[in-house]
Amino acid sequence: MAFHLDEDLSCPICHEVFEDPVILSCSHSFCRSCVKTWWRRKHGYECPVCQRVLRTPHTPRNLVVKNLCEAFLRRRNQNASAGSEDFCILHFEKFKLFCVDDQQPVCVVCRDSKTHFSHRCRPVDEVAQERKEEIRSFLIPIKRKLKLFEQVKGKCDQTAEHIKIQVQHTERQIKEQFEKIYKIIKEEEEARITALKREEKQKSMRMRRKIEALSSEISALSDTVRATEEKLGAEDVSFLQNYKATVERVQQRPLLEDPQLVPGALIDVAKHLGNLTYPALNKMKEMVSYTPVILDPNTAHPHLVLSDDLTGVRYGRRQKLPDNPERINYYRCILGSEGFSTGAHRWDVEVTNNDYWLLGVAAESAHRDKDIKSGLWLLKFWDGEYSVFSPPNKVVTLRMKKRLERTRVHLNCDKGKLSFFDPDTNTHIHTFTHRFTEKMFPYFSNGKRVELKILPEPAPTQTPLVTIVIFTVILTALLLIGMLMV
């Protein structure tokens, strides 16, 4: 019956289930649109199957075939909605074959039908296995790419969390440093105001005593003047009778020296306002230092621990840090935060009691994830022996008269020289000569828990006037920031 449906419900022209079937006088049925298209191409009215010429293009509807097709389509749609993907909707047979020419599964009836009669067909399971292996091979690079994306996303997530930690730590350090500056400024302000109030108290008391003494003298003199003027205003006889007493009273009143103003009575404003910020600046100098090289924590090996001011580094327990592109994961080392491409630069490093360290410079292009084959110029101390090397050149052992307590690194980019010195004895240790064509970064490596410390040096000196002006500007900015923070 399935074969019968396939043959009898299919249009001979389009080989699909009839759509609006019509019947010709020769008893053959076609889709209405198919037969009309056929006639237009042939420019005549003949049957596409038997080639019989028709007298008129009359095409009555074939209701029997139409009803059968509608029932068949309903059954096929029901099977499709029921999930019968393994069965042929035309013949209700299970798909056991795969048409290679049409690239679709077919049943045994489809294979023998007119549609697939001359096509190559193979077992479904055999073709499916081949295609699955093909798809699996396509998935291999996609899975690798997916894994890579997941790894990078994981690192980005870790970096995002580390950014928050960095911000919290850095903000805390900034606040602590500025709180120290605010404390010095506040203490100096309070000391100045206390001194001003003390002088005010002393001079106000002195002036009060002076005013009291003057008031007493004024009162006594006023009494004498008033009493004498009263006598002068009396009648002549009375005046003469009291003349002798009046004269004695006036003469007995001693005339003091002319009153004088108190010298130095006013507040010594110049003492309080003169060089107002200079004492605070001197106190701040004790806590402020200038370090020529600052370490970059974003390049540090996970085993290296940095000091809060980023001038010291030691070996420690491995930390959970993001695997960012700047980080050096192969060597236990760290770079300076600033690279140099021109000019002369130097920095001193304290290496006391440390048995394993390396100092020097690294080129910006030096590979940071794997063994660095070039772009390094280093002085090394290990197992009691000093040496210098620059890959791919061999290590050169140095003979030293004494153990170094401090090491000075001097880089002259313009002259192409990297030199090492003992600053305690001003002794030259070694000099590399190279034409530095890219930015060079200070390089530090520490294999011990003893800290390598970059030593501070005096900041460039300024004239007192320039220093005061600069400090005044800084002080004003700090005070404004403090007011905003409050």
Image (cartoon, rainbow, N blue to C red):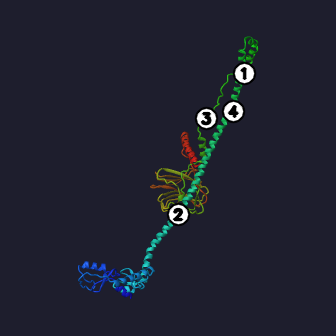
User: Which tag is nearer the camera, tag 1 or tag 4?
Assistant: 1
Relative placement, left or right, of 198 versus 97 is right
Image location (x, y in percent) of residue 93: 41, 86
Residue of label 3? 269
Up-down: is 104 above or below 449? below
- CB atoms at circles 1 and 4 under 8 Å apart? no
Kind of residue at badge 4: Met
User: Which tag is nearer the camera, tag 4 or tag 2?
Assistant: 4
Q: CA distance from mark 3 to mark 1?
A: 40 Å
Q: CA distance from mark 2 to mark 3?
A: 61 Å
Q: Earlier in the sequence, mark 2 or mark 3?
A: 2
Residue of label 1? 223
Assess disc 3: are there few (<14), some (14-19) or many (≥20) residues with their C-alpha within 10 Å of its C-alpha: few
Q: Which mark is residue 157?
A: 2
Residue 65: image quadrant is bottom left
Q: Earlier in the sequence, mark 4 or mark 3?
A: 4
Q: Which mark is residue 203?
A: none
User: Which tag is nearer the camera, tag 2 or tag 1?
Assistant: 1
